[in-house]
């Protein structure tokens, strides 16, 4: 980092401001806790998507698979520790009433979230070694198919509730405001994701990932083990997506296999959109994209009721067609020197030549 | 996991037994698959056209089918025979496609395929909800009022409307091929597909060709949709499976290979029906999307082998 | 930081005060997320009309008397797009942002399953009329009340009928073969669980047990199986869409089964849509306009049907009736609680014991209505006629149904 002291100070002040706002938000906007929790999770989704989509050039519509796997594994762990899952998910109801007290609930989450991360990572490694050999549009559509197929399979699997879905454990009263609890967990996960990716982007792995995006054949010719790199990158994404999925399930409290867990047509596309909106291949882009997207989405769903998806479709078209570089891309083209790109005075025509 | 497989395996033998003990039902399943397969092939041919000429993967393909279906539904509701809707929905959808091209698509023709996937995805969401607002989310049909035919002493049934739609689908495919081969516009389309720049140099207005191609694709899908509404059912959210089927057929058959597209379409229809029967209907869509993954893996594996030869 | 915290607390407190201030006016607002778009549109519409009609009647009758004040009722609607995710988000919004203190249920068990945890979290009572799956009542929810009979009862009487009429089919009850085709959603799956239990109880054999995808458009594969295995009873459940698809394809493929029973035929309006093809179908219903229940607001069940018909120009399916009843249950609880405090209203709801035009309402400790049986219709000459239970039967069921012939 070749930053002046002044820049460093400014940056630190910026981070501090975000932390303060983040900590105070549940009290500042008490009515919006659920939406703000969702926002933190969206940030994780967008960051994790961009890790392979933006940085590596592998545009996946199927990252919901990891989210969904994480969601189910976390919920199944939370329930399975204390009750028979088949009873819990039975369509007829299990005959008993399932109650989770505070230690049960906390233990369930403490074991469920790591389990979700591991399961998602394993799925990513296995799927990745199979499908990451595909290029470009074939990969994109293949992952779209994967996401929907996963949802349909979950919807047929009776043990996990099939199409009836599955409720996550009802949080005990002793836990206080469950939304605040989830808010801070999600915020912590988002910060951890951000910091981890920020660290990864300073390592050689990031260079390799970018090399795959810029020219995979050349990267391979230069001796990079591209397949391994791709699988590794997707697995890293999956770890965060899995944990975020576990929390998302607990936030929504009801896991529908097709509409919530493997929601390829909603969350699966939204995460792509958030990353593109903010700026693909940048660290802050997905974060900014998620914030704007979540606000816009809530706005649409409140004021354009019934037409919200028409508006969303329009939004997608407008973003993709007119702002494919996203906000950060636009800013970078405008102020390349802020991004550490040297600008030759002679060739310094605005925007052009801003690539590293 | 165990229970899942146990259930899967347990459901296999009994269904399989039916097919072994009463082989006539194979005929029924394959026939049904064949009849709908022709419609899949029609939509797939449109997708191949747009993909080949404009380098766009059109995710809104299934929505064009859906829109065409609603034209037929409007006809049926107003007492006009829905068979008449087949050409009309083609014309209406041609206009829709043309307008969409002039509004949005022309901007993404030169972009990479991922942009076209996302942008057309946006269009598809938009069209779904729009139709939902106009017609509601209900399942609709355009009743053609035709009867049912019985074969093999009543063991196999074929509804006439499915037969008619099958024949019409094939006829439409034929007309399309003749059009591309012989008409002036068709020739420009093919020239543009081969080399857009050369076509431009030779004085072909490629913008117009693109608009016509996209409109033509929408028109094909629209007519197919009218057939779907008559022979099956229609609702605002049926699009995506049609898109995925088209994509799969194109991947298997390749671009610009009508015979291959028809064969793949009919094969897919039959395979899907068999899978729905054997695995249970709840896995039919899983089968379609799973097959997509398998087909793509197979293609990848083939390419890899080719690359190894080059070494 | 500390200052920020404090000032935000003050702001929150001010908001809370403003919220109660708004309530002190003469209107009590109920919130509802219903399916105005998506796959449950038809049934969602019936639900909303039921709510609207009851609210209208109550307001015309002078509103609800709570303590010494009289309130008008209003409903704030959102469209849940028939997806649980949106439903839950909207419930959250109704409660947290719009400050609604009481919720009416959405359409379908799936949506109710998604919304119930939210209302529970905020301690907001929800009276629902369209979530019948028993799996709703095992989480120990204290704020969820359902006015309808649970799903396993839907087709129970149809199965009993099949056993009774076994002789007419030339069989013993144990020889009766049953085919099941159920949508893969919480409601239909619980109906299936009930039918499986019934089949076991009556000793019948299940020969087909197909689950249909939610986006179901084509039952050809299942019906081919039915033709191969020649069951005596075909049982189908899949909301309005499932009923419409089934009736259409059974007649189109000429699948002859002596007994065909399903849910939601009246809501799908199969008689008007498919005419003769719907004939002899057995339909489970929560309610019928010929039943003898009465209340002071609508009068008899027939009066409700008449009013509904003049308002919306079609016969009320039971979804509309039960939804109207849900509003009445709320009004009754408000009056008995004498306050609009959610916890007190909840207790009043738990103690509900009333008769409405729709049937008796009395909740058990898990919140489901245990005071009302289901009825079974058969489509005869284009009309829905009650054929079971015997207490309300207008006519004898026609079993087996005449063959369509090849």
Image (cartoon, rainbow, N blue to C red):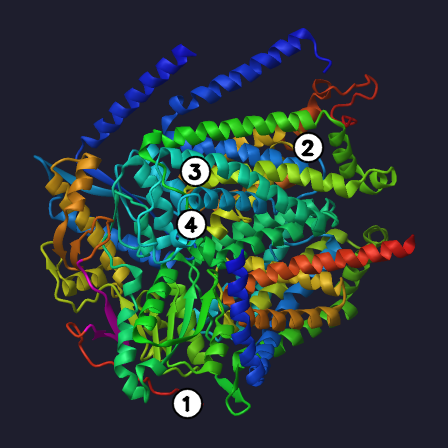
Label 4 in the same subunit as label 1:
no
Vertically, is C261 above or below A315? below
Disc 4 to disc 1, C-alpha distance: 44 Å
Image mark 3: chain: A
Label 4 in the same subunit as label 3:
yes
Disc 2 to disc 1, C-alpha distance: 66 Å
Residue to which mark 2 is pinned: A281
**Which label lies toward us, 3 or 1?**
3
Image mark 1: chain: C
The range drawn in magenta is: C371-389
Of the pair A64 and C382, the residue shown nearer to us:
A64
Give whichever of discs 3 and 2 has the lower sequence position: 3
Of the pair A14 and B138, the residue shown nearer to us:
A14
Q: Cβ–Cβ below 8 Å for labels 3 and 2?
A: no
Disc 3 to disc 1, C-alpha distance: 55 Å
Callout 4 secondary element:
strand
Rendered image: mark on residue A251:
3
Q: Main secondary structure of the magenta part?
A: strand
Residue to which mark 1 is pinned: C405
Disc 2 to disc 4, C-alpha distance: 36 Å
Callout 3 secondary element:
helix
- Residue that lies at the very extreme toward the bottom in this rendered image: B153
Q: Position of residue B119 (x, y in %)?
A: 62, 46
How many neighbours does mark 3 have within 10 angstroms: few (below 14), some (14-19), or many (20 or more)?
Answer: many
Disc 3 to disc 2, C-alpha distance: 29 Å
Of the pair C36 and A245, the residue shown nearer to us:
A245
Rendered image: mark on residue A104:
none
């Amino acid at each position: 980092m070749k930053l002046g002291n002044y820049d460093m100070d400014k940056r630190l002040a910026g981070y501090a401001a975000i932390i303060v706002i983040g900590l105070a938000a549940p009290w500042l906007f008490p009515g919006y806790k659920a939406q703000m929790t969702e926002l933190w999770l969206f940030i994780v989704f967008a960051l994790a998507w961009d890790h392979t989509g933006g940085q590596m050039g592998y545009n996946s519509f199927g990252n919901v698979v990891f989210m969904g796997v994480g969601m189910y594994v976390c919920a199944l762990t939370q329930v399975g520790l204390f009750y028979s899952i088949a009873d819990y998910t039975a369509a007829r109801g299990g005959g008993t009433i399932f109650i989770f007290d505070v230690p049960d609930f906390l233990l369930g989450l403490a074991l469920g979230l790591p389990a979700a991360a591991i399961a998602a990572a394993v799925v990513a490694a296995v799927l990745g070694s199979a499908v990451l050999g595909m290029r470009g549009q074939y990969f994109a559509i293949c992952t779209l198919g994967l996401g929907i197929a996963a949802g349909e399979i979950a919807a047929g699997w009776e043990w996990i509730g099939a199409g009836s879905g599955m409720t996550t454990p009802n949080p005990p009263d002793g836990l206080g405001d469950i939304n605040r609890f989830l808010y801070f967990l999600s915020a912590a996960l988002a910060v951890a994701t951000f910091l981890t990716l920020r660290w990864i982007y300073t390592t050689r792995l990031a260079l390799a990932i970018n090399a795959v995006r810029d020219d995979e054949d050349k990267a391979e010719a230069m001796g990079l083990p591209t397949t391994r790199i791709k699988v590794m990158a997707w697995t890293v994404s999956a770890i965060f997506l899995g944990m975020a999925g576990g929390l998302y399930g607990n936030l929504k409290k009801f896991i529908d296999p097709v509409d919530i867990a493997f929601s390829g047509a909603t969350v699966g596309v939204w995460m792509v959109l958030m990353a593109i909106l903010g700026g693909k291949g940048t660290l802050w882009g997905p974060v900014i994209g998620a914030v704007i997207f979540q606000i816009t989405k809530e706005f649409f769903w409140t004021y354009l009721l019934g037409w919200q998806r028409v508006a969303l479709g329009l939004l997608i078209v407008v973003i993709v067609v007119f702002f494919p570089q996203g906000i950060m891309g636009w800013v970078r083209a405008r102020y390349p020197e802020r991004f550490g790109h040297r600008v030759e005075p002679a060739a310094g025509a605005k925007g052009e030549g801003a690539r590293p | 996991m165990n229970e899942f497989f146990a259930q899967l395996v347990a459901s296999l033998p009994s269904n399989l037994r039916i097919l072994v003990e009463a082989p006539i039902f194979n005929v029924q399943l394959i026939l049904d698959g064949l009849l709908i397969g022709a419609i899949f092939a029609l939509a797939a041919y449109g997708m191949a056209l747009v993909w080949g000429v404009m380098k766009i993967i059109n995710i809104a393909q299934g929505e064009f089918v859906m829109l065409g279906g609603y034209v037929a539904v409007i006809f049926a509701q107003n007492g006009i025979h829905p068979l008449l809707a087949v050409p009309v929905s083609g014309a209406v959808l041609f206009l829709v496609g043309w307008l969409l091209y002039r509004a949005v698509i022309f901007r993404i023709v030169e972009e990479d395929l991922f942009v076209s996937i996302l942008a057309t995805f946006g269009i598809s969401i938009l069209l779904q909800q729009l139709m939902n607002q106009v017609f509601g989310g209900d399942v609709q049909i355009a009743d053609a009022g035709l009867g049912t035919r019985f074969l093999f002493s009543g063991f196999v049934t074929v509804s006439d409307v499915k037969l008619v739609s099958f024949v019409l689908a094939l006829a439409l495919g034929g007309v399309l091929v003749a059009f591309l081969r012989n008409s002036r516009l068709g020739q420009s389309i093919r020239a543009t597909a081969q080399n857009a720049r050369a076509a431009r140099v030779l004085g072909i207005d490629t913008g117009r060709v693109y608009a016509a191609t996209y409109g033509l694709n929408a028109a094909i899908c629209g007519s197919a949709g009218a057939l779907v509404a008559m022979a099956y059912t229609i609702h605002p959210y049926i699009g995506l499976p049609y898109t995925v089927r088209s994509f799969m057929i194109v991947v298997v058959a390749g671009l610009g290979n009508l015979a291959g597209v028809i064969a793949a379409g009919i094969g897919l229809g039959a395979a899907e029906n068999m899978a729905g029967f054997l695995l249970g209907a709840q896995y039919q869509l899983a089968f379609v999307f799973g097959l997509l993954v398998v087909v793509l893996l197979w293609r990848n594996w083939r390419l890899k082998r080719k690359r190894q030869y080059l070494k | 930081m500390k200052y920020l915290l404090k000032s935000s607390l003050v702001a929150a407190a001010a908001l809370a005060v403003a919220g109660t201030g708004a309530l002190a006016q003469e209107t009590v607002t109920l919130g509802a997320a219903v399916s105005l778009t998506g796959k449950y549109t038809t049934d969602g519409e019936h639900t909303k009309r039921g709510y609207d009609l009851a609210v209208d009647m109550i307001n015309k009758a002078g509103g609800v008397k709570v303590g010494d004040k009289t309130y008008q009722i209003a409903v704030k609607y959102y469209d849940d797009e028939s997806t649980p995710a949106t439903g839950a988000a909207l419930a959250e919004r109704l409660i947290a942002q719009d400050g609604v203190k009481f919720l009416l249920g959405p359409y379908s068990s799936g949506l109710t399953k998604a919304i119930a945890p939210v209302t529970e979290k905020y301690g907001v009572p929800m009276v629902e009329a369209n979530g019948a799956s028993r799996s709703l009542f095992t989480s120990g929810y204290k704020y969820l009340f359902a006015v309808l009979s649970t799903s396993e009862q839907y087709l129970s009487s149809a199965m009993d009928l099949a056993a009774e009429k076994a002789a007419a089919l030339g069989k013993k009850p144990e020889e009766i073969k049953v085919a099941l085709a159920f949508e893969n959603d919480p409601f239909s799956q619980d109906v299936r669980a009930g039918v499986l239990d019934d089949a076991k109880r009556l000793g019948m054999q299940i020969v087909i047990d197909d689950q249909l995808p939610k986006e179901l458009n084509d039952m050809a594969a299942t019906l081919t199986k039915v033709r191969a295995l020649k069951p005596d009873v075909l049982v189908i459940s899949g909301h309005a869409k499932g009923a419409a698809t089934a009736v259409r394809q059974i007649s189109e493929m000429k699948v002859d089964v002596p007994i065909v029973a399903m849910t939601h035929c009246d809501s799908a309006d199969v008689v008007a849509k498919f005419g003769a093809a719907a004939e002899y179908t057995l339909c489970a219903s929560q309610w019928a306009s010929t039943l003898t229940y009465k209340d002071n607001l609508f009068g008899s069940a027939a009066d409700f049907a008449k009013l509904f018909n003049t308002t919306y120009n079609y016969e009320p399916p039971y979804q509309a009736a039960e939804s109207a009843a849900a509003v009445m249950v709320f009004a009754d609880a408000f009056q008995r609680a004498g306050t609009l405090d959610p916890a007190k209203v909840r207790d009043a709801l738990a103690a509900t014991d009333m008769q409405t035009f729709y049937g008796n309402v009395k909740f058990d400790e898990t919140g489901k209505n245990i005071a009302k049986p289901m009825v079974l219709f058969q489509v005869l000459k284009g009309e829905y006629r009650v054929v079971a239970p015997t207490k309300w039967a207008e006519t004898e069921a026609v079993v087996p149904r005449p063959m369509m012939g090849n």
